[in-house]
Image: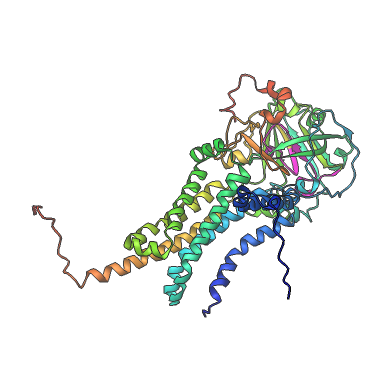
Amino acid sequence: MLLKKSSDIRSSEITPEGIYFNRRKFLLGAGAIAGAALVAPKVERILMPSQPVLAGTKLDASKGSYSTSEKETPYNDITHYNNYYEFSTDKYEPADLAKNFNPRPWTIKVEGLVNKPKTFDIDSLLKMPLEERIYRMRCVEGWSMVIPWIGFPLSSLLNQVEPNSKAKFVEFTSLYDPKRFPGQQRSVLEWPYVEGLRMDEAMHPLTILAVGLYGDTLPNQDGAPVRLVVPWKYGFKGIKAIVKIKLVEREPVSAWTKAAPNEYGFYSNVNPNVDHPRWSQAKERRIGEFLKRPTLMYNGYGDQVASLYTGMDLKKNF
Amino acid sequence: MKTKYSKPFVFLACLMPLGRLAWKAFNSALGANPIQVITWSTGTWTLVFLMVTLSITPVRRLTKQYWLIQYRRMLGLFAFFYGCLHFTTYIWLDQFFDLHSIGKDIVKRPFITVGFTAFVLMIPLALTSTKASIRRLGKRWVTLHRLIYATAILGVIHYYWLVKKDIRKPVIYAAILGTLFLYRILVWMIERVPAQTPAEKPSPKIAPGTVATK
């Protein structure tokens, strides 16, 4: 029987010694690259959640001139990540708990140091000239969103009631109704939620009352039917479900200031140089992004609002 | 009660929280702020495993299920495992290796200082968890491993200091930890009292060289 002798391996096919001894390293490297290639789209999906889903009643709004051109946060994230303690202290819960909240009928009483106090019905507010305002929103907790609000300047409402010369501040009050707001059955904060602005802040063209989001009426979990939006301040200043606006002489004490005066001041302007006593405010995570980005002074609205605070010690007036 | 499969079974059960997190991650079910969810979940499970580890001693004594001791090391190591994941999430996903801001956080933020300390204290325990170490260290091993009490206390403080207002959950952990400590204090007091009384009469001890004045 003839056994074929195996042909000799040509010297060109012999693996060079260096590569031979590094074969494990090579395999590891190749494995890592292949693994990364497999995982990369997944990782992107994990870190870039949800596509927009739209619901609600369409609102007619003109394009406002104060909008940012930054990429908008998806509707699903804006409506499923809410600090709304009237429903729950868990940001993932208001979306579900607010489902059956009915923001009708609804009126807002505007009173105090004004010549013409007036109660506005929400449906009359929806008929005011509405604008889309795409604003950055920076939460005091260190995350941010870009939100296409629909609303009108607070000043256009205040002008209708004619504040008198004694009015120095504006105090806002949320609905108090523990039956509709399950979170109000526990005293995490002193209810109802109260917020305040200085008169010039309230009259500033950037300050709006929002009645809509992404072209539709405001979802319940975002503060329906009407909420405050002050884009250069931390998000908690944006009081939701407003029922009363009062013009007053003295600085109002807001709900969070009452809860922790050393942590949450009256102004609460976004300021990367003044840390929260327990965490840094220098950076923020934009929802949907992986790397943190630096937080901007006055949340990037310094050109419009820095002049309101000239000469003030921002460390003291935090 | 105990078969040859029970240890691997417990081991796999301990991996479930990680499995659930991974499943959610790959199905985009971690919500709007995935990194925060990963941080919270791994932190929570570190605390849970610390509590479970500390429950072994009371539970095995009270229920006379003495074999439970065989699980204590594994559970303690899982506390360390989830602690490592929690720490890695912070260093990597949250801060993205920004050593400057990590250093500042550890020094300036009390809740991070205590969390970091709690984690560091677990390292020697994990390193000396082998049978060889137990034999080599003898009694000192027991003393060293009391560090887990410090880790658990600091871990609960870390949680308490981090929440904004709603302290219900950290208070629950504090209550559980308090109960586990109370058991140990009671045992210590009970075991101490009868050991002394029959041995010697309660005569006042006078240190050598002390002169009684009255």
Viewport quadrant of the N terminus of chain A:
bottom right
Can you say whether B26 is above or below A169 in the image? below
Residue found at the far front of this picture: A1
Name the residue rendered at 35%, 65% in the picture: B135
Q: Which of A307 and A124 is in front in this view?
A: A307
Region in magenta = A216-244
| Residue A220 magenta | yes
Query: In the rendered image, which quarter is residue A256 located in?
Result: top right
Residue A40 x, y percent position in the rendering? 73, 49
Task: Tell me: B191 left or right of B57.
Answer: left
Name the residue rendered at 46%, 63% in the picture: B54
Q: Nearer the viewer, residue B189 or B106?
A: B106
**Whether residue B41 can be seen here:** yes
**Whether residue B31 can be seen here:** no
Q: Nearer the viewer, residue A197 or B75?
A: B75
Task: Tell me: B61 left or right of A173.
Answer: left
Task: Tell me: B104 left or right of A114.
Answer: left
Q: Which of A76 and A194 is in front in this view?
A: A76
Residue B147 x, y percent position in the rendering? 41, 55
Residue B98 x, y percent position in the rendering? 58, 38
